[in-house]
Amino acid sequence: MADSNDSIPSHTEKIYLGGKEHRIRTGCGSVSVIVYGDQDKPALITYPDLALNYMSCFQGLFFCPEAASLLLHNFCIYHISPPGHELGAAALGPDDPVLSVEDLADQIIEILNYFGLGAVMCMGVTAGAYILTLFAMKYRDRVLGLILVSPLCKSPSWTEWLYNKVMSNLLYFYGMCGLLKECLLKRYFSEEVRGNIEVPESEIVQACRKLLDERKSTNVLRFLQAINRRPDLTEGLKRLHCRTLIFVGENSPFHSESLHMTAKLDRRFSALVEVQACGSMVTEEQPHAMLIPMEYFFVGYGLCRPSQLSESPRSPLSPSCISPELLSPESMGLKLKPIKTRVSLDV
């Protein structure tokens, strides 16, 4: 356990709705971690996508009552922010280290050691999913399982590399300008919720846009540069034997990459859930689509649903709402085949 001086309690705990911020000094700089729940429970760590933190990347999932009950019933949640992405973060200075994806993965092991954690469950979105996958490859004995949302695993394609370079130039010359935010929102959300001339953008997109206003362009640029220089993880995926549950929105720009990753993972330990009419950030756009697959993923670890949900015949976790295929006796509690969900846009 690190010295108590290394942990700086949050002065704005009301913002975190009961969570407590720890500012942890690592060999690669300071990292903010928000902790929710009973620290005697198994740990679940989260890592967000580019320019996001837990408020803008996981709030929809944790504000979904059934999902929040399922997760907090079984886990203590540790929300890790990329350097400079936490709420109220100041701009990183020239003396702050320029980090690679390897450095970001290495920060996580120092965070686990700080809290005295052993093996943890991991949940990441897109760039955050890449960082957690890299972490799982480097520190296999410290990962129980991976829940990856629209993950990256390959080096950037020429299209993505060029798109990222455009965003880098916008960040460098114009900061968090309107065009940059539009590029990011297109990365996160489907057209259905981004809106158009006839249909206004949804509340979740409006909320995300406001939270992006708080990001410092220098900090976002550094994370983007690290992600744009990422190595290909494909060769190591077959040797990744922790259980892995992948969600991907069918309208995500990274849909094909998620399918590629699923094909390269050992099918005995992995499953794919494709969410229809959804962009990359399933955690915000359709968090309810994650409920039942997550529950049956956790069954493989001997974890259970909260009793108040299992007693309700209307609960989304009720067996009557579950496809018979998901009830097959697989080692991880999931039928290991692509599962497509259909959620009405009118809901």
Image (cartoon, helix red, strand yellow):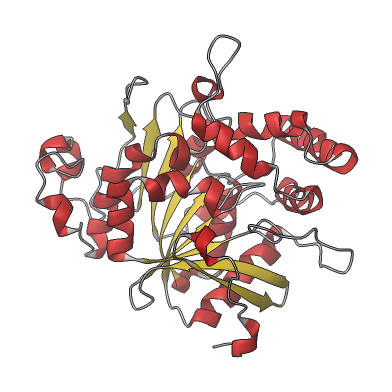
Q: Please give left or right for residue 91 compared with residue 69 in the image.
A: right
Q: In this picture, is 197 found above or below 206?
A: above
**Residue 201 occupies which quadrant of the picture?**
top right
Q: Residue at position x 33%, y 53% from top?
A: 68
Give the image location of residue 306, x and y in percent.
20, 58
Q: Please give left or right for residue 107 compared with residue 218 in the image.
A: left
Name the foreground residue: 290 vs 257. Answer: 290
Can residue 254 be seen here?
no
Give the image location of residue 245, x and y in percent.
38, 48
Q: Residue at position x 44%, y 42% from top?
A: 283
Can residue 33 be seen here?
yes
Q: Residue at position x 56%, y 67% from top?
A: 33
**Image quadrant in which the C terminus is located:** top left
Give the image location of residue 149, x and y in percent.
47, 44
Q: In this picture, is 51 found above or below 331?
A: above
Q: Please give left or right for residue 208 compared with residue 73 in the image.
A: right
Q: Residue at position x 57%, y 52% from top?
A: 128
**Residue 236 occupies which quadrant of the picture?**
bottom right
Q: In this picture, is 34 found above or below 245?
A: below
